[in-house]
Amino acid sequence: MAVGEETTIASAKVKIGVYGFTGCAGDQLIIIHTEDELLNLFNAVDVQSFVMASSNPIEGDLDVAFVEGSVSTGEEREHIQDIRKRAKYLVALGNCAVSGGPQAMYTNDGTFADRLKQVYGDSKFVTEPLEGSPIDEFVTVDFYIPGCPIDAPQAFAAITRLIHGSVPEPYPHPVCHECKLNENKCLLMDKKFCLGPVTAGGCDSACPNNGVACVGCWGPNPDGNFEEHFKLLESFGMSKEEIVRRIRNFGGLKILKHIEGL
């Protein structure tokens, strides 16, 4: 869907659902703990399902479904497919849903069976274990709100636009852009491992603002020049293997398309 294109979801009271899969539930907590906006949100929409806020979910048709967390079991795979069938629009909420998160840092490396056995031995599983993956590995996602956790102003701005029938504004710039706007000294100048140039913006460069290098927790910026950034980090004395390991901490499965072949 093109930016600026109007949707048709606006109605008297939009039905929404908020769901949590494998992750820390931090994105749902951000919504609940944003007291200044929470009552306005609940008054503006018909919250059908939000287990963290209500123990009486209604699993019917939805206008918008917000899903946090990656998919890591067969049960979650079936659940996300069911949500997709019932929802007009599906929104990936937070890094785990968008990129796979830390639990996807080794996804598709060929060692899943060995790692599973090392941790659980010969245990029998109630539901099929899967490698952690972003939700768009299983269903079509209409909009993405990155973050680890999500940024409340950015998230509520996107939610507000969605429930009023408009498209959320994209955040195409990297963390580096926000860092410069905040007039921070570039930590790369001190040869610190910083992923700001290749990480999606939206966090207002929270870590560099406090002298801490960006670890890439908002996932990869699609326009990032990964090849040149790898060369820069290698010039600091780091091996490519170590760079890949650290960039996959939060890059999850989505980072692979940017770094394969480097």
Image (cartoon, grey):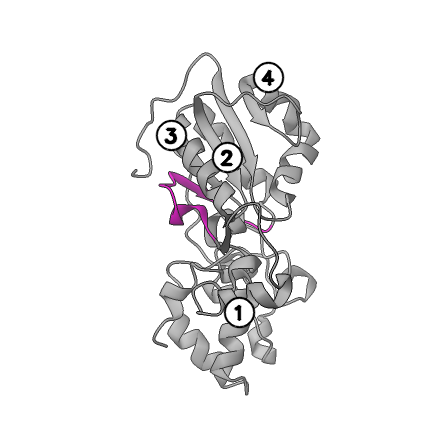
Q: Secondary structure at mark 4?
A: helix
The answer to whether mark 4 and mark 3 are in CB contact below 8 A is no
Q: Which percent across, then down, holds residue 48?
A: 54, 21
* Residue 215 image-quadrant placement: bottom right
- Amino acid type of disc 3? Lys
* Residue 118 image-quadrant placement: bottom right
Q: Earlier in the sequence, mark 4 or mark 2?
A: 4
Residue annotated with mark 1: 114
Residue annotated with mark 4: 43
Instruction: Tell me: 137 left or right of 213.
Output: left
Nearer the viewer's eye, disc 4 or disc 2?
2
Q: Is residue 109 above or below residue 36?
A: below
Q: Along the line of sight, which residue is nearer the eye, 24 or 142?
A: 24
Residue annotated with mark 3: 85
Q: Mark 4, residues whose alpha carbon is within 10 Å: few (<14), some, or many (≥20)?
A: few
The answer to whether mark 1 and mark 2 are in CB contact below 8 A is no
Q: Earlier in the sequence, mark 1 or mark 3?
A: 3
Q: Which percent across, then down, holds residue 75?
A: 50, 41
Q: Is residue 187 above or below residue 223?
A: below
Mark number for residue 66? 2
Nearer the viewer's eye, disc 1 or disc 3?
1
For the C terminus, the image quarter is bottom left
- Amino acid type of disc 4? Asn
Q: Earlier in the sequence, mark 2 or mark 3?
A: 2
Q: Earlier in the sequence, mark 1 or mark 2?
A: 2
